[in-house]
Amino acid sequence: MTVKILMLIFIIFLFLTAWYYFFALNQEKFIIFDISQNYKIKRLIKTTAISLIIMGFIGVIILFTLSKYYNFITLFISAVIMTIFSFRFTNLNN
């Protein structure tokens, strides 16, 4: 039961992160970077947000239908998505 509660909190954070990314698309700055003219960064943020939303829905399905060991799929793929975002964001800002 504890694993389900923690995974539900993690999935909520996935959705909140995706919401923040969509919110940041309408702003001129993302954290401290000016993204108003950089369409590659905007596309990266939008793609990451959509990926996190999809992973959140898949995580909810896994959480309530499969055993607790399958929750590692949600954790692993979400971590990979955020790692790819971090590396690509760093490369686009150089």
Image (cartoon, helix red, strand yellow):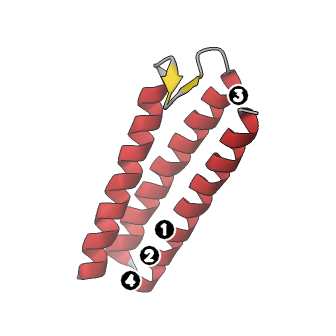
Residue type at mark 1? Thr
- Residue located 32% across and 55% down the image: 12
Determine contact: label 1, label 3, CB under 8 Å: no
Tell me if residue 67 can be seen.
Answer: no
Determine contact: label 2, label 1, CB under 8 Å: yes
- Under circle 2, the secondary element is helix
Residue type at mark 2? Asn
Marked residue nearer the N-terminal end (1 or 3): 3
Q: Quadrant of residue 22?
A: top left
Residue 94 place in picture, x, y as percent = 76, 33
Residue 53 place in picture, x, y as percent = 46, 48
Marked residue nearer the N-terminal end (4 or 3): 3
What is the C-alpha distance between the residues marked 2 and 1? 5 Å
- Under circle 3, the secondary element is helix
Alpha-carbon neighbours of circle 1 within 10 Å: few (<14), some, or many (≥20)?
many
- Mark 4 — residue? 68
- Residue located 64% across and 36% down the image: 44
What is the C-alpha distance between the residues marked 1 and 3? 27 Å
- Residue located 24% across and 80% down the image: 2
